[in-house]
Image: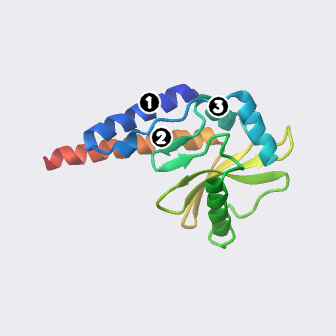
Amino acid sequence: MNWTALVGSLYAAQYTAAERLRKPALSMPPNPPACADAVDAAERRLGVWFDTEFRQFLLACDGWPSFGTVQLYGAGDLGVGEKWRRDSACAQAYFDTAASGAVTVPDGYRRVLVGKTVVSQRFIVMMFPTRANVAAAACWDCMAGIDLRYPDFGVWAEHEAASISYALGEEIADRRCLH
């Protein structure tokens, strides 16, 4: 996965749409890259091992306030801060219901909230291993009992970026037709 290319192209699409649609909130840039020490500290704080894709994402952009409609947390936010704790409590309440397919956390893994939407109760969570050299992590996109499993954070991000780009293009096209 080329995170620099994915982040750059999605930001360009969001920025262009923000100008055309006059919606400045769409143009929020990704955070600057995290340093390896900050990523390592987040792993220690959470007691997990990040998979390669999530680690590379943080090293390319340390979270993003507006990855489409999802706020992705940076290394310095994970496991600390009032907002992350509050959002994690909301996610846990969601997982405590029988509506969630991501309720079961396998032995040797920990569920970690890595992103959340502001408006709806949509959570992006990773199942990270708690020991080194364990099978790969998995990414879940959870909302309203429809929990979609992705093999890793990179696959989720590619899918989400394509959906965002498509939706922005459709909204721009719809507005052109109205004028």
Mark-to-mark CA distance, 1 and 2: 9 Å
Which of 175/33 is in front? 33
State the residue lying farthest toward the front. 82
- Secondary structure, mark 1, is helix
Q: Nearer the viewer, mark 3 or mark 1?
A: 3
Mark 2: amino acid: Ala
Which of 155/34 is in front? 34
Residue 166: where, in percent of width, then height?
Answer: 37, 43
Residue 83: where, in percent of width, then height?
Answer: 61, 55
Mark 1: amino acid: Ser
Residue at the image position 68 percent from the left and 28 percent from the top: 35
Residue at the image position 80 percent from the left and 56 percent from the top: 106
| Image quadrant assignment for residue 44 | top right
Q: Quick one: label 1 or label 2, which is nearer the N terminus?
A: 1
Residue 153: where, in percent of width, then height?
Answer: 63, 42
State the residue lying farthest toward the bottom. 98
Mark-to-mark CA distance, 2 and 3: 21 Å
The residue pinned by badge 3 equals 34
Q: Is residue 165 above or below residue 104?
A: above
Say whether residue 10 is left or right of residue 73: left
Q: Are marks 1 and 2 in contact (CB under 8 Å)?
A: yes
Disc ID at residue 9: 1
Location of the N terminus by quadrant is top right
